[in-house]
Amino acid sequence: MKKLEKRPKFMTVPAALKELEKIEMVRLTDNRYRLDHAVTAMQKTILKAFDMNTNVIKYQAQEISSTLKEEK
């Protein structure tokens, strides 16, 4: 885990987890799953602490979508 240059004082572990829980997927009319909303700046900051970015989230969402589509 990397240390961030600027440390937001309001970001506790429970607050960070609650913020990351807002990243969710929905099934659309074409029976594919996609991210419900774009990743926010706060979520990007949290992901950066774990050396991740939005591309990782988008890739994982595509993998989950294809796995769920194969199971049907």
Image (tube, rainbow, N blue to C red):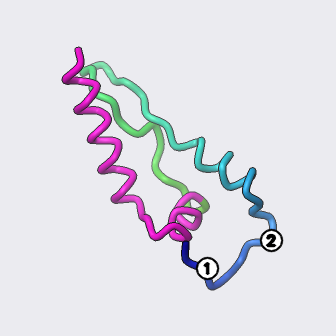
Seen at 29% across and 32% down, the residue is 65
SS under mark 1:
loop
Identify whether 49 is placed above or below 42: below
Query: Along the line of sight, which residue is nearer the eye, 35 or 49?
Result: 49
SS under mark 2:
loop
Identify whether 10 is placed above or below 24: below
Seen at 43% across and 65% down, the residue is 52
Magenta span main SS:
helix
Q: Residue furthest top?
A: 72
Horizontal and vertical percent for residue 48?
A: 51, 69
Magenta range: 43-72
Horizontal and vertical percent for residue 34?
A: 35, 35
Q: Which amino acid type is marked by label 2?
A: Lys
Identify whether 9 is placed above or below 26: below
Seen at 73% across and 57% down, the residue is 13
Horizontal and vertical percent for residue 40?
A: 54, 56
Seen at 37% across and 24% down, the residue is 27
Q: State the quadrant of the C terminus.
A: top left
Residue 56 is tagged as none
Residue 8 located left or right of residue 33: right
At label 1, counting other C-alpha atoms closer than 10 Å, the crowd grade (few under 14, some 14-19, many 20 or more) is: few
At label 2, counting other C-alpha atoms closer than 10 Å, the crowd grade (few under 14, some 14-19, many 20 or more) is: few
Query: Along the line of sight, which residue is nearer the eye, 13 or 22?
Result: 13
Q: Toward which corner of the image does residue 71 lie, by quadrant?
A: top left
Residue beneath disc 1: 4
Residue beneath disc 2: 9
Query: Along the line of sight, which residue is nearer the eye, 47 or 71?
Result: 71
Residue 53 in the magenta stretch? The answer is yes
Residue 20 in the magenta stretch? The answer is no
Q: State the quadrant of the N terminus.
A: bottom right
Closer to the N terminus: mark 2 or mark 1?
A: 1
Q: Which amino acid type is marked by label 1?
A: Leu
